[in-house]
Amino acid sequence: MEDCIFCKIIKGQIPSTIVYEDSDIIAFRDVDPQAPVHILVIPKKHISSLIDLKEEDELLIGKIYTVINKIAKKEEINEDGFRVIVNCGENGGQEVKHLHFHILGGKKLGLKICE
Ligand code: AMP
Ligand code: ZN
């Protein structure tokens, strides 16, 4: 997608701190971290949001969770715990219209998951 900021990160047109990359998935540090560890995991394929997922993406989404597992161990937040968030659409607070999984950890997160 031409004007998608995350597609530009995938293509290396916008700088980012990449923590993981393979042929299908890339993960990088959030530019405005909400926790000591705040990483975004995204498919390289442009999928606008969770609601646009198709059955053909099932394998890819499963793979994303395996990557999240690996990153959590590498970032050493696996034992203390962490949170994975996907915001979807206007009410879900999704700002970037390229499916992404937030990994948040490194501190005790509040129990409120919405305000
Ligand atoms: P969301 O509200 O779920 O769409 O989250 C979008 C996230 O992308 C926010 O946490 C932003 O801080 C983050 N973000 C936006 N632009 C960049 C960028 N260039 N590099 C890293 N993270 C970004
Ligand atoms: Zn995109």
Image (tube, rainbow, N blue to C red):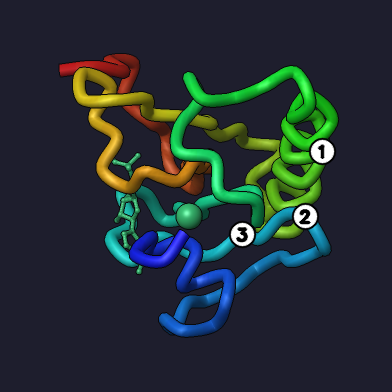
Residue 19, image x, y percentages: 65, 68
Q: Earlier in the sequence, mark 3 or mark 1?
A: 3
Q: What residue is pinned by disc 1?
A: 63
Type of amino acid under label 3: Ala
Type of amino acid under label 1: Lys
Q: Specify whether 2 is left or right of 44.
A: left
CB of mark 1 within 8 Å of CB of mark 2? yes
Type of amino acid under label 2: Asp
Q: Specify whether 109 is left or right of 25.
A: left
Element at badge 2? Answer: loop
Instruction: Using the numbered discs, state the Cα–Cα distance from disc 3 to disc 2 in whole angstroms.
Output: 11 Å
Q: Residue 66 or 46: which is nearer the viewer?
A: 46
Residue visible at 15% across and 18% down in the picture? 115
Query: Ligand 1 falls in which quarter?
Result: bottom left
Residue visible at 61% across and 32% down in the picture? 81
Q: In this figure, what is the number of numbered marks?
A: 3
Q: Specify whether 45 is left or right of 84.
A: right
Report the mark closest to the observer, 1 or 2.
2
Query: Which disc is residue 24 wearing?
Result: 2
Q: Earlier in the sequence, mark 1 or mark 2?
A: 2
Instruction: Using the numbered discs, state the Cα–Cα distance from disc 3 to disc 1 in whole angstroms.
Output: 13 Å
Q: What residue is pinned by disc 3?
A: 27
